[in-house]
Amino acid sequence: MKRIEISELTKDYGTQRVVDHLTFDVLPGRVTGFLGPNGAGKSTTMRLLLGLSRPTAGTATIGGRVFRELRHPLREVGALLDPQAAPGGHRARDHLLALAVSNGIPVPRVDAVLEQSGLAAIARKRIGTFSLGMRQRLGIAAALLGDPAVLLLDEPTNGLDPEGIIWIRELMRGLAAEGRTVLVSSHLMAESASFVDHLVVLGQGRLLADSSLKEFIDARSAPRVKLRTSEPDRLRAALERDGFAMAPAEEGRWTVDGIPAERIGALAAREGVPLLELADERASLEQAYLDLTADRTPFAAHAVNAA
């Protein structure tokens, strides 16, 4: 299967550097989340990959080739960048049919992706009558049309209802499980955490992180355990002997910082203290992301003090 390779990629617009010597790979067989604040360079990087803009320096290749070298690009790379770009006066099926014919894609594939994306019943309606969610589904159908090995999806859940979000989540996981290369740009941290395996994070055009989801979160959160016990005094004394403190939490629970649940479990067993609940607490992707990008967000809002 094909991988995406970004090497020293740089893009300047006049005196402004939007992408700054980026280097990372997107590998087959996993969903890679492409994250960063507004203005981080994510959309520009995708446009450079798809040949919609030329780099100032460096390379962006798919399977070792730049996009303009692909003879039938939709059969190798599927992309969703702007679902509003489809002509409003065209009917959905005709729009996909034109894409199929121009890329040597068999016509039956058009009806297959309309069915897959949930648009079969409205395939002959004009795109201008579509809601944002319906346009989003059409854009995803177009990306899937050539059954490509590589998918680039920019905010794929935008405008989708809950059923649609579950559908696209399962679709991306399924495509990765088939060995395809899937790169997904998103601002929705909680949603991203539900389907990504790997993360590439940008800030002000530079690479901030390139790691698995677990490694990314673990690197930005200290160990914390939440527990419940019928004998808190005995457990507190045992923990204090090892240099740890119990702090009260909600509904009779306690938290302990700086120690994993496994170690507390062993300590409680040694002391004969019953545990009714014991779990490691991890930072969310959103918390870890905000910690990393706090000083890389050019458009951050600030609280206004009342007069």
Image (cartoon, helix red, strand yellow):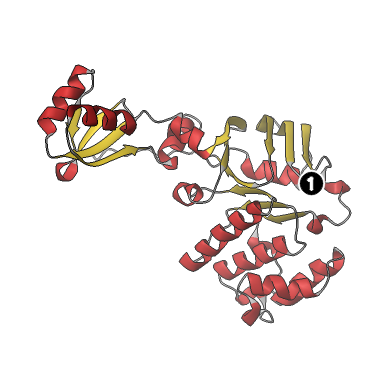
Q: Position of residue 8 (x, y in %)?
A: 73, 28
Question: Is 265 positioned to the left or the right of 231 in the image?
Answer: right
How many numbered tags mark residues here? 1
Q: Can the viewer see residue 264 in this picture?
A: yes
Question: Is 129 positioned to the left or the right of 264 in the image?
Answer: right
Whether residue 299 is situated above or below residue 206 in the rendered picture: below
For the point 68% across and 31% down, which residue is it? 22
Quarter holding residue 103:
bottom right
Q: Position of residue 237 (x, y in %)?
A: 14, 23
| Image quarter in which the C terminus is found | top left
For the point 33% across and 32% down, which residue is it? 262
197 or 86, which lies in front?
Answer: 197
- The residue labelled by disc 1 is 51
Disc 1 marks a residue whose amino acid type is Gly
Mark 1 closeness class: few <14, some 14–19, many ≥20 residues within 10 Å? some
For the point 69% across and 45% down, which residue is it? 28
Q: Can the viewer see residue 203 in this picture?
A: no
277 or 284, which lies in front?
Answer: 277
Question: Is 142 positioned to the left or the right of 278 in the image?
Answer: right
Quarter holding residue 65:
top right
Q: Position of residue 297 (x, y in %)?
A: 49, 35
Whether residue 212 is situated above or below residue 244 in the rendered picture: below
Q: Position of residue 282 (x, y in %)?
A: 37, 37
For the point 50% across and 62% down, which residue is it? 166
